[in-house]
Amino acid sequence: MNRRQNPRCKMIRAYGTELVDTLSGVRPLDQKCNPESRRKRLSDYGVQLREKMKLRKLYDVLERPFRNLFKEAARLKGSTGENLLMLLECRLKNVVYRAGFATTRAEARQLINHKHILVNDQIVNIASFKVKVGDVVAVRDRSKQHGRIVAALELAQQLPQPEWLDINAKAMTATVKRLPERSDLPPTINESLVVELYSK
């Protein structure tokens, strides 16, 4: 799969902000990485496009799957934007990250691809797999001593846990108690801009 890894400063300037949704935190910014430096005034379309790219990068989703998720969100009852965020949060890759088994969603994708993760006691190696209420996501027994997973869980214990997941760090399991709601997610995400972009 073709995934270009852009330099951090370039991404900061492109998205207008630092994408800091990682367990391990980030290094301090150099002055040249200031998102306000050399910023051009964007059109309404430019603002909407940048928000979409920011959301895609944050959740580590390529364009075609992201567009398909938007179409699915539009078919569901309720707010399309909130439905989109719910669908993004319910992808297995994100649940593994939220549970603290990985420090980033990209790392979570690797754990899933390498068959370290179970869903309801079955190996699932598809990062886009959609979990449902009642599903139990767990680290495979033979992988519980994996250094990266242990280190990620240690970091996760220092942070607030998602209220929609019931996380047992000792057993390395996470049960989906309910679907995530908008209040569970950062207010810095402006999903309405993404809806406006795709609704044109």
Image: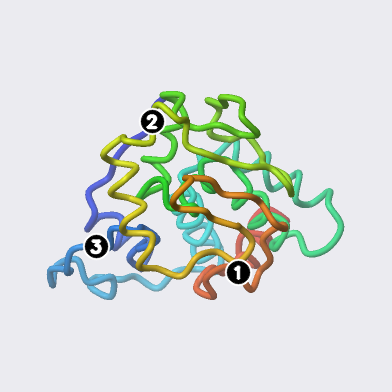
- In this figure, which residue is indicated by the disc labeled 3? 26
Q: Is there CB contact under 8 Å for labels 3 and 1?
A: no
Q: Which amino acid does label 2 sit on?
A: Ser
Q: Position of residue 117 (x, y in %)?
A: 50, 32
Q: Position of residue 188 (x, y in %)?
A: 50, 73
Mark 3 to mark 1 CA distance (whole Å): 22 Å
The residue at the point 48 percent across, 46 percent down is 171
Q: Residue 82 carries which label?
A: none
- In this figure, which residue is indicated by the disc labeled 1? 184
Q: What residue type is labelled 1?
A: Asp
For marks 2 and 3 on the same chain, the one whose residue lies earlier in the sequence: 3
Q: What residue type is labelled 3?
A: Val
Mark 1 to mark 2 CA distance (whole Å): 29 Å
Q: What element carries label 2?
A: helix
The image quarter in which residue 119 lies: top right
> With respect to residue 33, does 71 lie above or below?
above
How packed mark 3 is, by other alpha carbons closer than 10 Å (few <14, some 14-19, many 20 or more), is: few
For marks 3 and 1 on the same chain, the one whose residue lies earlier in the sequence: 3
Q: In this view, does 12 lie to the left or right of 140?
A: left
> With respect to residue 117, does 21 lie above or below?
below
Quarter of the image with the N terminus in it: top left
Q: Where is residue 69 in the image (x, y as percent from the top left)?
A: 67, 44
Q: Which of 103 and 140 is in front in this view?
A: 140
